[in-house]
Each structure stands twice: as C-alpha cells, then as structure tokens.
Amino acid sequence: MSSLDTDTICALATPPGTGGLAVIRMSGPSAFSVTDAASGRRSACTSFTGHTLHRDTIVGLDGGVIDDVLVSVFHGPRSYTGENVVEISAHGSPLIAGQIIARLLDCGARLARPGEFTERAFLNGKLDLAQAEAVGDLIAAQTAEAQQLARRQTEGRLSQAVQEIRSGVLGVLAQIEATIDFPEDVGELDSAACDAALMQASQQVFDLLATADRGILVREGLSVVLAGRPNVGKSSLLNALLRTSRAIVTATPGTTRDVLEETINLNGVPLRLFDTAGLRETSDEAEQLGVARTRETLHSADIVLLVLDAVAGETPEDADLRLTLAGRPHLSVWNKWDAAGQEVPPMDGVAVSALTGWNLEVLETAILDLALSGTVSRPESALVTHSRHKQALRAAARQIDQAKASLEAGLPADFASIDLRGVLGALGTITGETATEDVIAEIFSRFCIGK
C-alpha cells in the first residue's frame, strides 16, 4: 500500500467466533458515507462529532434490519490511522458480523489486508515503524514481561533512544559537510569534538545492543525439547512442569507417538515445551513416525532437556544421545530420583522426581539460567526486541567505527561523511525513515486482519 491509497478498508477487529460483541473497523475517506449507506441514512455519520458513540441499525439491500449496533466515530487525523475511522459494535454472532461486513463491501469498502490499519497509521505519521511493530508484539505477548516490553515500545522508548543517537551523528555530519562546502567560512574540522560525539554515539548503540538478547528472548521465547529413551519419564516431567496432567503417562514404553507442545511462563520468559517420542529402534510404524518427528524437533530446538532414568543409570543409548547434543545448549535431567534411593546429587545436570515434584524449582532455575546465559539480567532496561533492530544497530556500530577511523587517519572528510550517512540509514530502518517497501510489507504481513 502507498500513502496515496484512497480505498476505504474494513475488517473484523475482534477475534472470530461467537462472543458478546463483534467489532467491525473501517478506515478511509469514505468510512462515514459507507456507514450511512449501510444504515439507510443520509449524511448522519458525517454530521457526528469525533470521538462519539451513537446507536444505529445496519440494514440489508432489502431494507431489513441486520442488527442494532453502536457506531463509534473518529475524524481524521485524530484517529488511530489518521483517517476517518468508524467502529461498529454488533452482537457477537459470526453470522451477523459476516452480514455487516458484506453490507459494507456492497456500499464501497474493501476488505483490509493483515495489519493494514496499523500500516496506515505508520504511513500517516501516527506511529513510527518500531512503535507499529510493538502493536503486533502487544497482541502476541504471552507473558506479563513481554506485555510490558511491548507497551514501552508503543510509547516510543526505543524510538526516542534511536533518535537521540541520530541527532548526535547528524551534528557531526553537519560539521563535516560544512567544512567541505564552506571551508573559508567554517575553518578546519574540530576532530576532537567530532571524535567525542562519535564515542558517545557508539556507547549509546552498544548500550542498546546489550539489551537485545534479553529483549528478543522475552518477546519470542524459546523452544525446549524433552528428549530421551522411552519410559524415562518425559511425559511425566512435562506434566510436572505444567502443573497439570496434559500428556498420557503409562508404564508401557513407546506411549508417546507424536510431539506434544505446551507453553509455560518461567519468570517472564515464555518457554515452549515439546514432549517427544522416546528415541529407539522400533518396528512399530506409528512409533517410527514419532521417532522421526522427535529428531526433526531436536534439530530446531533452542534447548534440549536430556531426560535420564536415575534408577537405570546411564545406558549406551544415553551416551549416544549425549554425543549428538555435544556443542548444543542442553541439560541432563535425572528423573525418578525418588525411586533411585540416592542421596548425593549427580555430577552433571539436575536430579528431579516428576512423580513427587521434588527439585522441580531447581530444574526451572537451571533452565532459566541456561536460557539467559549471556543476556542482560535487568528486564526493565530491555528495549531492543527484534532481530532486525539488533542487525541495524550492529551495522550502525560498524560504520561509526569506520567514520572514527577515517577521521583519526586524517583521510578526506568525504570518507567519514559517507560512513555517517550509512549510520543514519541503518538507524532509520528501525524507526522507518529509510526502511524499504519490502521490509515494511513483510512486517505488517505478520499482523492479524483488523489491526
């Protein structure tokens, strides 16, 4: 979509399905006239003042009433998208919502694409790109910490930090270009002042980068796969971590035939737990498929919990599994410790009892420590929550270093000028000033329809 798009768009803004209310959102230059046409009135919506709520009806082509509704009116530019916006609250029947949307389409609107309302807000200057991304993060947040991070992003915390860096770099660039264009008036470049300003900008970039791993982890979460031989208690351990009976548990080896996924919130970090089929050679066709899926899941896991039987001890099969996990983040979990009758904890990993719940808190702490290793431990300071932000900051850091090196080497000022423009370009991709249309389209394609 370009900023010149004059279509009026509509979509269901509430989740599909039956509920108390269904809200249909519409945005564009014809939002008011389309609403009037769908309600059988003339210029009523246009005459309403902004940010007001009105009772109305939506009627079909035959004049019959589809539903009694409440109509919220927002005049652009004082609206979410910056355009004229109407939100129609109807009874929460999928049939009614579908009929109202069909009626709006008949009256001149078109269906919105995923994220198109927020995309219009970005294109109309209501949000920058980082704030727009955070809207999607807020909707998708799985933990309270992820919610708070997204909330801070929508308020512009990251954008403000980036703009502060850009301002410092722009000041240096202005000095350099002034010495190039007006050497008689400006005189020689104050290299010491420029170097100090670039040092400050570099530190600000690295301060942001220091928050990236934690921020991305809180937003995206991690996949944690429970793997091991059959009957070592993987499903029992999953149930214990979930604090509920989710997976089927029997004494018969090979009960789990497929990958079972559940999510837990571990101190603000969403962890996707995968219970998998026991790894062994088998002639059972269904179990073979389960083992194959286990190996696929292992390949994409962020962390693997290698579940071992404390009663049986380590077997040659366990040793082989350890070898396959070498160099990858994993943790040995010695299950059935209550039945093993051992008092001394294992030399490696964590001893637990999925049956009694003993030592589960220690296991959770170990998982979290492994997940957060190398990340900033202060979640309130995290600002960078997307990999693309991290990549842009790394590119900016490299080019700041190149500009400093050029100045220190006494090279022509044009060299530093080129590098500093690269810094501004990299930082601009975060907030949207220099983001390409492909990047923008890809970001908003991940949004739900109606947002």
Image (cartoon, helix red, strand yellow):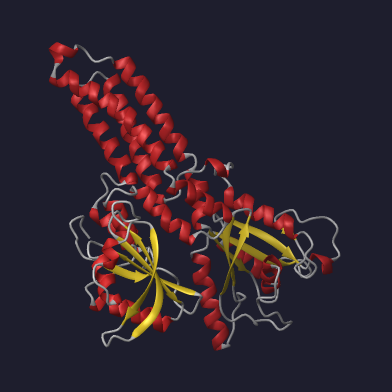
Q: Quadrant of the N terminus?
A: bottom left
- As displayed, is residue 97 above or below residue 81? below
Say whether residue 221 is left or right of residue 41. Answer: right
Q: Quadrant of residue 364?
A: bottom right
- As displayed, is residue 405 above or below residue 89? above
Q: Which residue is nearer to you in this view: 45 or 426?
A: 45
Q: Which residue is nearer to you in this view: 315 or 406?
A: 406
Say whether residue 146 is left or right of residue 417. Answer: right
Residue 44 in the image: state x and y as whole percent: 28, 67
Residue placed at 34% from the left, 28% from the top? 168
Residue 422 in the image: state x and y as whole percent: 26, 37
Residue placed at 26% from the left, 63% from the top? 46
Residue placed at 45% from the left, 40% from the top? 209
Residue 65 in the image: state x and y as whole percent: 35, 84
Q: Quadrant of residue 341?
A: bottom right
Q: Which residue is nearer to you in this view: 176 or 84?
A: 84
Q: Which residue is nearer to you in this view: 392 or 11?
A: 11
Q: Is residue 416 visible?
A: yes
Residue 383 in the image: state x and y as whole percent: 47, 43
Number of disc labels: 0
Residue placed at 29% from the left, 53% from the top? 82
Q: Quadrant of the C terminus?
A: bottom left
Say whether residue 418 is left or right of residue 215. Answer: left
